Image (cartoon, rainbow, N blue to C red):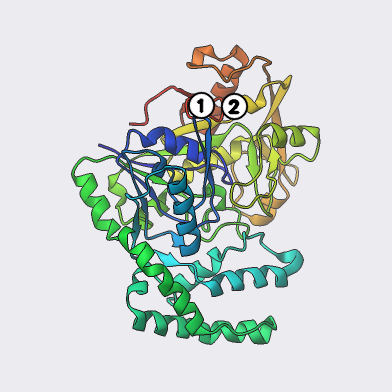
Amino acid sequence: MPALVLLGAQWGDEGKGKATDLLGGSVDYVVRYQGGNNAGHTVVVGDQKYALHLLPSGILSPGCIPVIGNGVVVDPSVLLSELSGLNERGVDTSKLLISGNAHIITPYNVTIDKVTERFLGKRRIGTTGRGIGPTYADKINRVGIRVQDLYDESILTQKVEAALDVKNQILTKLYNRRAIAANQVVEELLGYAEQLKPYVADTVLILNKALDEDKVVLFEGGQGTLLDIDHGTYPFVTSSNPTAGGACTGSGVGPTRISRVIGILKAYTTRVGAGPFPTELFDEDGEALRRIGGERGVTTGRDRRCGWFDAVIARYATRVNGLTDFFLTKLDVLTGWEQIPVCVAYEIDGQRVEELPYSQTDFHHAKPIYEYLPGWQEDITKAKTFSDLPKNAQNYVKALEEMSGAPISAIGVGPGRDETIQINSFL
């Protein structure tokens, strides 16, 4: 049975939660492999809407085991609050597994994140202020706190004190802030230990054994390809690897286990935060996409920047992820336009460029070159098969598929769990 990776093929917010949930009933494990509570998924089940931030979307599927892998950074207070909220709504969260090697977002990571962004002023990156970047920095600098450290008070105290030796110098001397007391941090973190203990496990061993037993494992990325720390629009990126390679390092499952890589594409393009965005709209069309698509960040609460579909980005995502399939979401949002522009290439310094430029400077100056496809007026939310779609909607999907370099195997025609057209099976 397959191991599948499901990830965002744009700047995030493509509808990964809907896609993961659609597959959740067919898989045994759903694994978050990177990011933290800076990601957000909205899943609609019947008349119920769930906003998930840190938990894998598979937690809403009764037969599925949700896993937070070693590549995720965990804010214990956010995780416990999210679990509590789901429990209150009758969702069983008892099967959740958390890697003991996942890193903890500490109170000082959050503080450093917020004061650094304020200090940068106009040069700020546009982080969520939740301590994600500083936690990953601590991980790379080998001064991070892991989930397993919560169960050895001596080691935890030593690590917190070592981290604060440097951070308090920065806070007091650079940012003119108060120093943070190590004992208070240790006390707060130890307070989470017993509540988290039932979930902590050797997830690397569990996942590999599951694959040995022909279980189906779905790896779920947060954010999107263009926010990848290595392959995104640096420095306006996240601090981890949402691309397919991150699924291996963030879970402990080798690349030869992966059988399919599914990219989630929105039928137009959005992004949150700062950074270049060639097809961004500042007119009535942009506002209409924002309004009709409900384009507000699940985690950040910020309005998303909106623009037309960018085929250059889609081709790039296909290449760097080795995509085998696309799941196209929010096609219904485009209903009502007479013509729909699609960016097929960029103009950079008077030259036509059909692939994503590696140079940050070139990408910053890229101007979209559009082709115009005829739109449709019919309501498509009740469509159950591809042939149910209006001819122009079918042609739009076919054009995007040809431009993007991988087959579109599913189409979202509405926010509901059942408002999806399945063209090819992912399993």
Task: Answer whether labels 1 and 2 touch (C-beta < 8 Å).
Answer: yes
Residue for point 42% across, 68% down: 192
Q: Which of these two is toward me, 34 or 44?
A: 44
Residue 377, percent from left and from top: 69, 15
Q: Which of these two is toward me, 119 or 409?
A: 119
Residue 358, percent from left and from top: 59, 52
Residue for point 70% across, 64% down: 124
What type is the residue that disc 2 sits on? Leu
Q: Is residue 368 left or right of residue 388?
A: right
What separation in Å lies between label 1 and label 2 (alpha carbons)? Answer: 7 Å
Residue 78, percent from left and from top: 50, 59
Q: Is residue 73 left or right of residue 344?
A: left
Label 1 secondary element: strand
The label on residue 160 is none
Residue 303, percent from left and from top: 70, 46
Dot 1 corresponds to which residue? 411
Residue for point 59% across, 51% down: 299
User: From where the camera sits, is residue 75 visible?
Assistant: no
User: In the picture shown, does residue 285 fall above or below 196?
Assistant: above
Quadrant including the N terminus: top left
Residue for point 58% across, 84% down: 168
Dot 2 corresponds to which residue? 331
Lower position in the chain sequence, tag 1 or tag 2:
2
User: In the picture shown, does residue 213 fall above or below 120?
Assistant: above
Label 2 secondary element: helix
What type is the residue that disc 1 sits on? Ile
